[in-house]
Amino acid sequence: MLTPFALPEDIWATNRMLAILPFFVLGLVLTRFEHVLEKTRWWLLGAALLTATALYPMAYAYMQDTQLTANFRSWNGFLLSLSLIIIVMHASPALRWLRPLAAYSFAIYLWHVFGTSATRRLLEGMGLDNPALHLVAGLIMGLGLPVLLYHVLQYIPLGHIVLGQRAGRRKTPD
């Protein structure tokens, strides 16, 4: 589809969407079903621990066999990612400050690539190849830009389409 525009195939990072899908799913669940999660939190944690225990060895074996990083673009990788997220959320109350981002998860899922890609290109263009700097700057822009976009689009006609929302929903997350 992008060939007529002479753009690289992965400009939208479509080849990596499944790897970040657990984060979108978690944000959606936290936003809409937090009361259910609280009631079933220990069952969820148990299921996540069992899933991670079963799938992590497979991911590790894949890395050893192929000399590559773990394949999080498979259903095994999806379930492992989701399990690890649930474990971290239950194991560390200190991370509860991240919960406000849950309301923005779909906007982050859709639009983070613009912030992270622009940051990476800018830093590489400046000759800055420090991985820690890339990580911090990418996180800041990959989260900040979509959140800002979310708030701006709330006041623009048809902005709900860009945010993947139904018409008439003009609710800003708390």
Image (cartoon, rainbow, N blue to C red):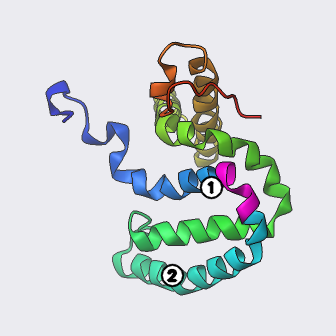
In the rendered structure, find residue 93 and report the number of the disc placed on it.
Answer: none
Magenta stretch bounds:
29-36
Q: CA distance from mark 1 to mark 2?
A: 22 Å
| Front position in the image: 117 or 94 | 94
Say if 130 sits above or below 168 in the image.
below
Residue 45 percent location from the top left of the image: 71, 76
Specify whether residue 129 is in view.
Answer: no
Camera-nearest residue between 135 and 94:
94
In the rendered view, tell whether residue 64 sits above or below residue 29.
below
Query: Quick one: quadrant of the C terminus?
Result: top right
Q: Is residue 57 visible?
A: yes
Q: Where is residue 103, by image quadrant?
A: top right
Residue identifier under label 1: 29
In the image, is 72 to the left or to the right of 98? left
- Provide the residue designation for mark 2: 55
Q: Please tell me which residue is depicted at 50% across the width and 26% down the height of the picture.
A: 167
Kindly report which numbered mark, 1 or 2, lies closer to the viewer in this rendering: 1
Circle 1: residue type: Val
Above or below 160: residue 128: below
**Residue 160 coordinates in the image, percent (x, y):** 51, 25
Q: What residue lies at 55% left-to-right and 50% top-to-bottom?
A: 24
Do the CB atoms of the residues marked 1 and 2 lie less than 8 Å apart?
no
Where does the image place residue 99, in percent across and percent down from the top left?
75, 48
Viewer-side residue, 11 vs 165 = 165
Going by the numbered disc 2, the residue's amino acid type is Leu
- Quarter occupied by the N terminus: top left
> Residue 68, position in %: x, y?
39, 69
Extreme residue in the left direction: 4
